[in-house]
Amino acid sequence: MGISDVLRSRKATFLFSDKEVKEETIVDLLDSARFAPNPTGIYEYEFIIVVDKDIKKAVSEACLTPNIDSAPFIVIIVCNPKKLESLFEKEEANEICIDNAAMVAEFIIVHSSEIGLSNASITNLNQAKMRQILGLPEDYIVRWVIPIGYSSEESKGYEQTPPKIGDMVHIDKF
Ligand SMILES: Cc1cc2nc3c(=O)[nH]c(=O)nc-3n(C[C@H](O)[C@H](O)[C@H](O)COP(=O)(O)O)c2cc1C
């Protein structure tokens, strides 16, 4: 499938089958995500790949998404905004972290969808619980959680239809 079709057909999945995914595949996804556009060249984000059954369960509870521990891998993007504070005020550094994590997450989501894997985005999470589960150093925050695997046939995604393009585009001025 070409990238344009991948973008139009991708759907989030919160329930996964037990079909195996190789660890090298996940590492390759993260390797390509290193090349996501980055505004500073500082790369303040890192990845945690969760494979342990009990940790996946704890993460799924802290994310209020009870079934994502069915995924063979849960990728977590963590950021250290302090790394940006030589260039930006604290608040701006936090905002840049959010933007950059979104860009990196999008690379992971699109690449994994392109190779037939399913995923979901989760950002509404219990930060304190996640920090404790993952043993995060003090300066880091959890920005994005992406369970990745093959979708279960019973998976019920969200039915969302974007507006028509003609309702979203303005030429030259609003
Ligand atoms: C930035 C972002 C954050 C999200 N956070 C959550 C979340 O915390 N919990 C959740 O159940 N879904 C979350 N979602 C929604 C799903 O991942 C999914 O994208 C959404 O339901 C739309 O379905 P679709 O991706 O199949 O179009 C988030 C989506 C985005 C883009």
Image (spheres, rainbow, N blue to C red):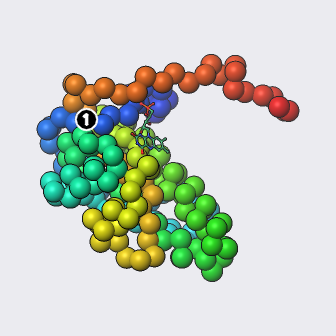
User: Is 122 displayed left or right of 72 in the figure?
Assistant: right
For image coordinates 20% across by 51% down, the residue present is 57
Q: Residue at x 30, y 68 (%)?
A: 132
Determine if residue 121 is in view. Answer: yes
State the residue lying farthest toward the bottom.
86
Q: Looking at the picture, does residue 171 appear above or below residue 122?
A: above
Residue named by callout 1? 15
Q: Give the amino acid type for the residue marked by disc 1 in the picture.
A: Leu
Residue shown at 53%/76% (left/top)? Answer: 83
Q: Is residue 159 above or below residue 117?
A: above
Q: Is residue 54 above or below residue 128?
A: above
Residue for point 40% across, 46% down? 122
Quarter of the picture containing the C terminus is top right
Residue closest to the far right: 173
Relative depth, front residue between 99 and 133: 133
- Residue 89 location, quadrant: bottom right
Q: Residues within 10 Å of mark 1 (few under 14, many from 20)?
A: many
Q: Is residue 24 visible?
A: no
State the SS at label 1. Answer: loop
- Quadrant containing ligand 1: top left
| For residue 59, side relative to residue 40 (left or right) | left
Q: Position of residue 97 (x, y in %)?
A: 55, 62
Q: Quadrant of the N terminus?
A: top left
Count of all numbered marks drawn on residues in the image: 1
77 vs 18, left or right, is right
| Residue 62 point in image, percent of width and height | 32, 54
Asked whether mark 1 and ligand 1 are closer than 8 Å, the reply comes as no
Residue 20 lies in what quarter of the image?
Answer: top left
